[in-house]
Each structure stands twice: as C-alpha cells, then as structure tokens.
Image (cartoon, grey):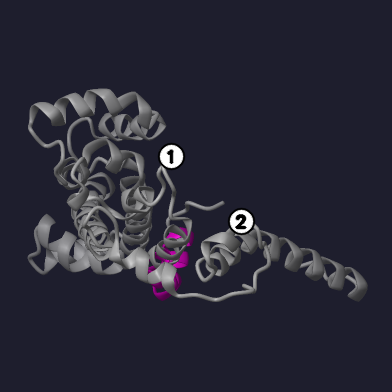
Amino acid sequence: MQAYPRPTAWLVHALVMALGILMLYPILWLISSSFKPDHLIFSDLRLWPAEITLDNYVKGWNGISGTSFGSFLANSMLLCLLAVLGNLVSCSMAAYAFGRLDFSLKNIWFGLMMVTIMLPHHVTIIPQYVLFHKLGWVDTFSPLTVPKLLATDAFFIFLMVQFIRGLPRDLDESGRIDGCGPIQIYWRIVMPLALPALITTAIFTFIWTWDDFFSQLLYLNTPAKYTVPLGLRLFLDSSSQSNWGAMMAMSVVSLIPSLVIFFSLQRYFVEGISTSGIKG
C-alpha cells in the first residue's frame, strides 16, 4: 500500500472528515429537529436547538386517526420478520439446488432466474396487482409476504449460490458416506457453513422491507394495517396543517431497529459480501 507524506495524509484525513460530516448533517439535523418546537424546525438550522421539547415524541407516539405509532411499528416488524423468514427458507433452498444438485435444464433455469434481476420492478407492478386483487389479497399482508416464500428475490439466490459454490464438495461426499441425503446435507452441512450469506440476506431483506413505501402504499388501505413509512406519511397533510415535529420525532424512532440490526450483525454482513464474490 502506498504511504502518503505526512502533510498529504493530514489533508486526506481532513477531506474525508469533511465529507463524512457533510453526509451525516441531514441525519443530525433530523435528530435535532425532533427536539425543536414546530416554529423553529425550518427557521433554525443549527444542530443544537435554542429550545428543547419532548412534545414531538409524545404527540408522534400517540399517532394519528386513532392509531398509535406503536401499531405502525408492530405492523412493520411483523411484515419484516415474515419477509426475512420467507427469503431465508425459499432462497437458500433454491440456491442449494442451483449450487449443489444436478437436474435437467439447470443452466437454462439459472439463466432465466438471472434475467429476472435485470427486469425493472415497475414492469411487473400492474400484472401483480391484478393477480393479487383477483385473489382477494389487497389490504392484507399476503402480497408483501407470500411471494417471499416462493424464492422471488433472485438477487439473494444468486448471492447464496456464489457462497455455496465456494464450499468444498468433499463435505457433501463425507455426508453421503455417513448416509445423508440431499435434504440432510442441505440442513446439517451447507446451511451452518452458509451463515454469513444467510445473515446478509436477512439484513438486506429487513432493511428493504422496513424502508419500502411504494408496495405497502399499493396494497394496504386500512390505517390500522399501515406500516411505519405509511404512518409517517399521515403526519403530512397537503390540505391542512402538517405535524412536522411529530414526523421528525417518529422518523428518529423508526431508524432505531435498522441501526440495531445492522451494527449488531455487521461482522457477518461484511463476511457474507466478501466471500460471495459480490463486491463494490
């Protein structure tokens, strides 16, 4: 690795710190604004509030339209857990089949799966909505969770296939000598070794589902079933007065689950990305 002269190193460090502060400023401003009275949120851009109040958190947690923000958090958490569980089971089984088993037209099926990664999500929105509407699934969690049980997230299948292909096939032979079938090899040998890839899949699925707004807006109509993104939208009303303070406060609260999960599993996340060959 090339070593920079000391003045150049200081300059590089100062530039990186300045860029870091610039990127963190919106988040710091959001946290600061959640403690400001409404009349200071947009008039005072300083990070340290001139007046500090907790009313935004109280009003925000009480919710809106008779539904507390705790209900939105519970709905989002349930949706994320079902999505994570579905992706871990279905995508890992599909990845094991592509990575370890031999079956007819395997390469063609794998190529077709890879094509779905390149297919824009917006192309499938209308056909999916028509299908789920005819099934009577609109205004339920089914359109947002059932597809996860059918291995529809090709990116996670590809990620796990890359990881599983890197595991020595001698382990499979050892399992067969001990009398293990394909299912036992999948469950007892491959899955424990694929833990970093599974955790990476779980983190991505949780964060993407937690942050998803459009799909949840499309399929959920009843406020009692709303998730965190839809609940935050309720604080903004274009036809009357918006409660910006409550929205800022609950936005801060909604960041906590994602941050806790990411930083608690960060070690496995980096390992899963680096060993599956998906970098940069």
Q: Percent position (x, y) of residue 224?
A: 18, 52
Confirm whether the magenta stretch covers residue 257.
yes
Confirm whether the magenta stretch covers residue 183.
no
Q: Residue at x 66, y 62 (%)?
A: 44
Q: Percent position (x, y) of residue 158?
A: 35, 45
Locate the N terminus by quadrant. bottom right
Above or below for 112 versus 191 = above
Q: Which mark is residue 42?
A: 2
> In this image, 74 relative to 2: left or right?
left
Q: Residue at x 65, y 59 (%)?
A: 23
**Residue of label 1:** 238
Camera-side residue of 115 and 165: 115
Dominant secondary structure of the residues highlighted in magenta in the image: helix
Kind of residue sitting beneath label 1: Ser
Q: Residues within 10 Å of mark 2 (few under 14, many from 20)?
A: few
Q: Is any atom of residue 105 visible in this view? A: yes
Assign a secondary structure to mark 2: loop
The region drawn magenta spans 255-274
Mark pair 1, 2: CA separation: 17 Å
Camera-side residue of 165 and 91: 91
Q: Earlier in the sequence, mark 1 or mark 2?
A: 2
Q: Residues within 10 Å of mark 1 (few under 14, many from 20)?
A: few
Assign a secondary structure to mark 1: loop
Q: Quadrant of residue 243?
A: bottom left
Kind of residue sitting beneath label 2: Phe
